[in-house]
Amino acid sequence: MTKRAATGALIGLALGDALGFPTEFNDVPAILARTGPWREMHLPRPAIVTDDTQMTLALARGIRTATARGHIGPLWLTPPVRQEFVDWYHSPENNRAPGNTCLQACSLLNDPQRDWRDASRTGSKGCGANMRVAPVGLVPGWTDEERAGAAQLQSALTHGHPTALAASDLTARAVHLLAAGIEVTGLVGQLRSYALENRTRYHERWLGDLWMRTTSDATPESFIARGWDECLEVLDRLAAALKTPSPETDPCLTTGDGWIAEEALATALQCFLLFPDEPLTALRRAACTRGDSDSIACLAGAFAGAHLGADVWPREWEGRIEYRDELLAFGTLWDA
């Protein structure tokens, strides 16, 4: 029996999002006062998700449109993903406390005459770029270059900071490696090696002259290296935290609160790697954090589901998640 990694990742992502939605903006004592012991947290009724899952589905729809036309590349991917992000911006369902960067960029992307690079917020490395990137790690058949380029491009449509680009690339890479069956003990080392290998690689085919929209970088290589260096620093903090694991301590204390891209990646990875074979415990740990709990839990759920597959999530939970049918449709498409 196949593990159906894409279905597992997408359902896990949405479950984490829904579990963390009510706890976002609260510190741990306040969360515990409301939920009781964190290891016993229940999925809310109804299981409503945030913009994290909504934008994941927007990206998934854009990818599906692009791949239906055949070969994947920036000219095929950019228009449908841009349109899906604009449609999300106008949707009446877009009422889940979305981030300002996404709203500002999408309002500019709404002008079809504007080059998308002029809409990109190159000063923002908020986690809104990598909370939605899981589909890039799940689509079968892409080359490493296509996966990296697509991950960075979808980030750059809204969050053009080099750290947002690098963190999105790393998040998609982690999802892809886990879906492919990597040993979890080697994951952080593999991500670190990937960051070092790509530290000065600027994906001009996908990003064009985005780097020139900043004032602080003399070359595209120095632009992107800034992002990879910040990701490498937080990966080192993650490795140190995992050497002396402390499951009862808020993971935000060691790898950050997750409002910014590299910290959302590292803290979600910490929650997953503390409990690699206990996906619900990983989600609950991620949701019981002082930081951006829905995004941290959303990413932790994507990692756990990619690693363990679709059957690890309780049927009763999966059956109640918002957008369930569409999530399952994309999972079925990419698991096939």
Image (cartoon, rainbow, N blue to C red):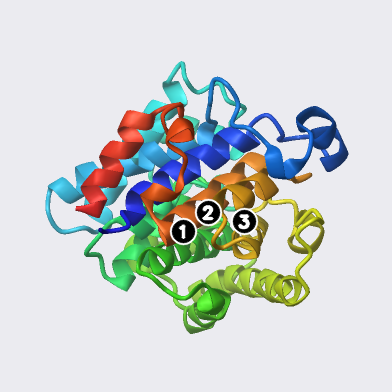
In the image, which is nearer the foreground, mark 2 or mark 1?
2
Question: Which residue position is annotated with label 2?
Answer: 160
Secondary structure beneath dot 2 equals loop
For label 1, the crowd category at 10 Å Cα-Cα, with few meaning under 14, some 14 to 19 and many 20 or more, is: many
For the residues labelled 2 and 1, the Cα–Cα distance comes to: 8 Å
Secondary structure beneath dot 3 equals helix
Question: Which residue position is annotated with label 1?
Answer: 210
Question: Which residue position is annotated with label 3?
Answer: 268
Query: Is residue 91 in sight in this rendering?
Result: yes
Residue 262 pos. (x, y %)? 63, 60
Residue 157 pos. (x, y %)? 44, 47
Q: Residue at x 28, y 56 (%)?
A: 139
Mark 2–mark 3 contact, CB under 8 Å? no
For the residues labelled 2 and 3, the Cα–Cα distance comes to: 22 Å
Q: Residue at x 25, y 58 (%)?
A: 1
For label 3, the crowd category at 10 Å Cα-Cα, with few meaning under 14, some 14 to 19 and many 20 or more, is: many
State whether residue 43 is above or below residue 193: above
Q: Residue at x 74, y 42 (%)?
A: 38
The three-letter code of the residue at mark 2 reads Gly
The three-letter code of the residue at mark 3 reads Ala
The three-letter code of the residue at mark 1 reads Leu
For marks 2 and 1 on the same chain, the one whose residue lies earlier in the sequence? 2
For the residues labelled 3 and 1, the Cα–Cα distance comes to: 28 Å
Question: From the viewer's perspective, is 100 left or right of 158?
Answer: right
Residue 138 pos. (x, y %)? 33, 56
For marks 2 and 3 on the same chain, the one whose residue lies earlier in the sequence? 2
Mark 2–mark 1 contact, CB under 8 Å? yes
